[in-house]
Image (tube, rainbow, N blue to C red):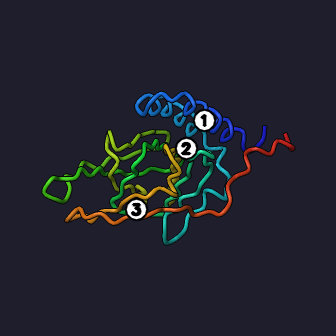
C-alpha cells in the first residue's frame, strides 16, 4: 500500500460524488460520510502538510479538482491560533483529524453586527458542515493552548482562489479577501510506479 492510497481513494470517491450532481444538501450528507471515514484513521496525512507555523494557522492544499468543483485542504493550527470572523460562499465539510477545535457561528443582524452563537467544541473524528444555506460565517480556533490541531476541509470550489469576506465583529462590515494556500506543491497522489 502506498503512503497516498487513503487520500487518493478519498479524492476519487469524492470526485465521483460531485459527478453525480446531487445538489448541495445530498452532496453534504454523502460527503460527510466520506470525510468521517477519512479522519477516522490518522495514518495518511503526509508530514509536509501537517506542519504548524508559530505565527499563523496553515492552509495546505492537498487536492484541487481541475474544474474547481472541489478542493481538499489540511488546516494546521498552532497552539491558541484562530481565524477572524469569515465566510466561505460555498459548501464545506470539516473533519477533525488531530486535537480539537472550537467553532462559534455568527449570524448577521439586519441593523448591523452579529448574533453570536454558542461555542461548539469539535473533537477528533467529528465532522461538521457549512454553507451559505445552513450558515457559513464563523470563527474557528485550536481548542488547545499547548499543542497543534489538524482538520481536513473539503469545499465545493477552489477555496484558496474564492473571493470571500472577513467581518468586523462590532459593525459586521465586510472586507474581501482571497486566502490562497500555505504550500507551493501538493502531494503526488497519482504516481503509482512504486506500488
What residue is at 56 percent from the left and 36 percent from the top? 40
C-alpha distance separating marks 1 and 2: 8 Å
Q: Nearer the viewer, residue 124 or 113?
A: 113
Under circle 1, the secondary element is helix
Residue 138 percent across, percent down from the top left? 33, 53
Q: Nearer the viewer, residue 150 or 172?
A: 172
Q: Which mark is residue 70?
A: 2
Q: Nearer the viewer, mark 2 or mark 3?
A: 2
Instruction: Determine contact: label 1, label 2, CB under 8 Å.
Output: yes
Instruction: Using the image, determine if residue 5 lies above or below residue 151.
Output: above
C-alpha distance separating marks 2 and 3: 24 Å
Residue density around tag 3, few if under 14, some if 14–19, many if 20 or more, within 10 Å: some
Q: Which mark is residue 57?
A: none
Residue 160 percent across, percent down from the top left? 52, 57
Q: Which mark is residue 82?
A: 3
- Picture quarter containing residue 3? top right
What residue is at 24 percent from the left and 48 percent from the top? 117
Instruction: Determine contact: label 2, label 3, CB under 8 Å.
Output: no
Q: Nearer the viewer, mark 3 or mark 1?
A: 1
**Furthest residue toward front:** 67
Q: Earlier in the sequence, mark 2 or mark 3?
A: 2
Instruction: Using the image, determine if residue 158 lies above or below residue 134.
Output: below
Q: Earlier in the sequence, mark 3 or mark 1?
A: 1
Q: Which mark is residue 15?
A: 1
C-alpha distance separating marks 3 and 1: 30 Å
What residue is at 32 percent from the left and 51 percent from the top? 137
What residue is at 52 percent from the left and 44 percent from the top? 154
Residue density around tag 2, few if under 14, some if 14–19, many if 20 or more, within 10 Å: many
Amino acid at each position: 500500500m502506498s503512503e497516498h492510497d487513503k487520500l487518493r481513494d478519498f479524492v476519487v470517491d469524492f470526485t465521483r460524488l460531485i459527478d453525480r450532481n446531487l445538489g448541495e444538501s445530498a452532496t453534504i450528507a454523502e460527503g460527510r460520510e466520506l470525510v468521517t471515514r477519512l479522519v477516522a484513521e490518522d495514518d495518511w496525512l503526509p508530514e509536509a502538510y501537517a506542519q504548524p507555523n508559530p505565527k499563523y494557522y496553515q492552509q495546505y492544499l492537498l487536492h484541487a479538482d481541475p474544474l474547481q468543483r472541489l478542493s481538499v485542504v489540511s488546516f494546521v493550527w498552532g497552539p491558541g491560533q484562530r481565524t477572524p470572523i469569515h465566510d466561505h460562499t460555498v459548501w464545506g465539510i470539516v473533519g477533525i483529524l488531530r486535537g480539537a477545535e472550537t467553532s462559534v457561528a455568527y449570524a448577521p443582524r439586519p441593523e448591523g453586527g452579529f448574533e453570536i452563537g454558542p461555542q461548539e467544541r469539535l473533537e477528533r473524528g467529528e465532522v461538521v458542515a457549512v454553507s451559505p444555506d445552513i450558515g457559513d460565517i464563523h470563527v474557528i480556533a485550536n481548542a488547545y493552548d499547548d499543542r497543534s490541531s489538524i482538520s481536513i476541509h473539503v469545499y465545493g470550489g477552489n477555496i484558496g482562489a474564492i473571493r470571500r469576506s472577513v467581518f468586523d465583529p462590532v459593525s459586521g462590515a465586510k472586507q474581501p479577501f482571497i486566502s490562497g494556500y500555505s504550500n507551493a506543491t501538493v502531494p503526488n497522489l497519482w504516481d503509482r510506479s512504486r506500488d
